[in-house]
Image (cartoon, coloured by chain):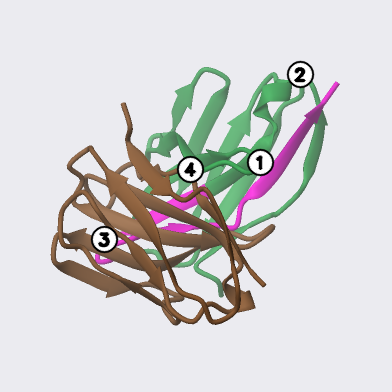
Chain colours: A brown, B green
Amino acid sequence: NAGVTQTPKFRILKIGQSMTLQCTQDMNHNYMYWYRQDPGMGLKLIYYSVGAGITDKGEVPNGYNVSRSTTEDFPLRLELAAPSQTSVYFCASSPKVDTEAFFGQGTRLTVV
Amino acid sequence: RKEVEQDPGPFNVPEGATVAFNCTYSNSASQSFFWYRQDCRKEPKLLMSVYSSGNEDGRFTAQLNRASQYISLLIRDSKLSDSATYLCVFHTGTASKLTFGTGTRLQVTL
């Protein structure tokens, strides 16, 4: 019973490097989200998708890109990593926008 | 005014105590409300939905006060295992996303 799977779990990046955070869900959910959570802070929405082929910006999209070519996958791309992107990244999915969101276990990213 | 406001705590309570958290929201069009629980270094998980009539799940009771625009979570007979951060979450009908509060940290001690 996989649910939402994120990879990698941990990553250290150097300033200016790029990487893709992977997120896949096996629940056939239409809605998918990327959040970041800084220490002691709440979740901030980076990007979201209401279905395959549709993505939109959240509160803090700068420095990130997403794609949603399939229902299952919603990768998050970091271009030119900066120390300000050091955070824990959570991917989530839900069948409808006003129902329970299921979260992946998170990716802890450090940019040095 | 912020979209959602929670007292960050921490609330330090002894085992067996009753503790309550409130969460205020600014958008009166908000329609769906939830409490999520987040353990240290883990992902958030749904604790319970909040219904207009109030709802109870074991030791947990959630209430919604639309007039004053807040939701509350009451935990009775606190257990050590209740130690976590509790996030209030709501959805506004026209939005395509959930809005999360910053969380209230609860520490239950012996």
Is the residue marked by circle 4 packed among few (<14), some (14-19), or many (20+) residues within 10 Å? Answer: many
| Residue occupying the point 49% across, 38% down | B63
Instruction: Report the residue marked by disc 4.
Output: A105
Tell me the SS state at disc 3: loop
Alpha carbon separation for disc pair 1 and 4: 12 Å
Q: CA distance from mark 2 to mark 4?
A: 30 Å
Residue beneath disc 1: B40
Q: Earlier in the sequence, mark 3 or mark 2?
A: 2
Image position of B44 with respect to A68: above or below: above
Spatial CA distance of label 3 from label 4 is 28 Å
Q: Quadrant of the N terminus of chain B?
A: bottom right
Question: Which mark is nearer the camera, 3 or 1?
Answer: 1
Q: Earlier in the sequence, mark 2 or mark 1?
A: 2
The residue drawn where x is 41% and y is 47% is: A6
Residue A97's x, y, as percent? Answer: 26, 53
- Residue type of the residue flagged with mark 3: Gly
B12 relative to A61 in the view: left or right = right
Local crowd at mark 2 within 10 Å, few (<14), some, or many (≥20)?
A: some
Question: What's the mark number on residue B93?
Answer: 3
